[in-house]
Image: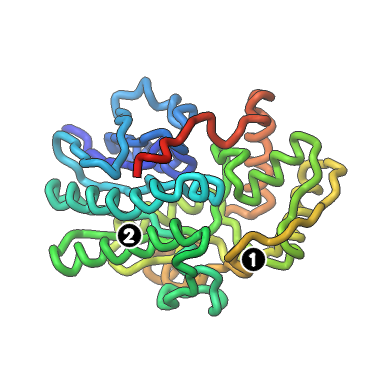
Amino acid sequence: MAKERVLITGAAGFLGSHLCDRFIKEGYHVIGMDNLITGDLRNIEHLFHLDSFEFSHHDVSKFVHVPGELKYILHFASPASPIDYLKIPIQTLKVGSLGTHNLLGLAMDKKARILVASTSEVYGDPMVHPQTEDYWGNVNPVGPRGVYDEAKRFQEAMTMAYHTFHGLETRIVRIFNTYGPRMRLNDGRVLPAFMGQALRGEDLTVFGDGSQTRSFCYVDDLVEGIYRLLLSDCVDPVNVGNPNEITIAQFAEEIIKLTGTDQKVIYKPLPVDDPKQRQPNIDKARSILGWEPRVDRSEGLRVTWEYFKSLPKERLYEEAHHRDFNKGEA
């Protein structure tokens, strides 16, 4: 029998590439789609020899055509770090709006179930802690982070509209801070930033006074939660993340201890609208999906550190991008 087919957008990115691995392992035929603005083919090159994988170089903000049947669509295409969406704000808005619209239309045409990747950023700088799915958020729509936050909020609204109006099978996952192998060292997020600085012998940079918190989920745990949500009957947004909260100052000390380096911690001003607290309430994921994170942070950090240490030395000094983004594209 022919394998059921799954389309995964953002396939060459950090999360998308791990999802490709999981769905191939589960016996699906995976079509990975990416425009490679922030994705990296090195994340999926180990799949190219497989009959159960094919790659499509395409921007989902433009019309999306996939021949043949599709069982599922997972929409993970989007810039996902501050460096990305501050450098390419228009494309960030487009992939969350036009891209989501195109993929919802494709799901309608194929009668496929679609899961969209939302984010804890829909909560903005939250005034409720920990964050529950019924909290509407505290987002500055015209601030520098607004292009990402509002793209994801619009994506959720569009997805729910297709479900309620068209009866489309939809799922929405709100992803909290995730880490693991295949992150870009220079993508602006705190974990690869700290590890990259440690590898280069640089001091670790903490923004603000370090009292702001994050909750880090290992990528394998996240993928398991996403897989369970896709196969569940839950159409409302679900938080998937690790509720084990830590301050950034404490996290910097963990990284110094893990890496065995003697770098100092230096402090710089906190960026505009940077969330002060981030911790998921995962009661819904526990009750509906039977899911909770299993990988201890110390183990996940060890595996991630080993991955970064294994990279060729020249990649430690790569800029986040080597491309000229076409600012006139919008």
Residue 288 located left or right of residue 183: left
At a point 31% along the width and 38% down the height, the residue shown is: 59
Q: Nearer the viewer, residue 261 or 3?
A: 261
Element on which disc 1 rests: strand
Residue type (three-letter) at the residue carrying disc 1: Glu
Q: Quadrant of residue 17?
A: top left
> Residue 14, how many percent across, how many down?
49, 41
Q: Nearer the viewer, residue 208 or 13?
A: 208
At a point 36% along the width and 67% down the height, the residue shown is: 237
Residue 22 located left or right of residue 299: left
Q: Quadrant of the C terminus?
A: top left
Q: Quadrant of the N terminus?
A: top left
> Residue 48, how many percent across, how many down?
37, 23
Q: How many marks?
A: 2
Q: Nearer the viewer, residue 52 or 198?
A: 198
In the rendered image, the residue lying farthest to the front is: 328
Name above or below for residue 152 compared with residue 51: below
Which dot marks residue 52? none
Tag 1 and tag 2, C-beta contact below 8 Å: no
Q: How would you rate the neighbour count of disc 2 (Cα within 10 Å): few for under 14, some for 14-19, many for 20 or more?
A: many
Foreground mark, 1 or 2? 2
> Residue 109, how many percent across, how many down?
12, 48
**Label 1 belongs to which residue?**
245
Give the Cα separation between the discs numbered 1 and 2: 27 Å
Element on which disc 2 rests: helix
At a point 68% along the width and 61% down the height, the residue shown is: 270
Residue type (three-letter) at the residue carrying disc 2: Gln
**Label 2 belongs to which residue?**
155
Q: How would you rate the neighbour count of disc 1 (Cα within 10 Å): few for under 14, some for 14-19, many for 20 or more?
A: some
At a point 81% along the width and 53% down the height, the residue shown is: 266
Residue 243 located left or right of residue 289: right
Q: Is residue 163 visible?
A: yes
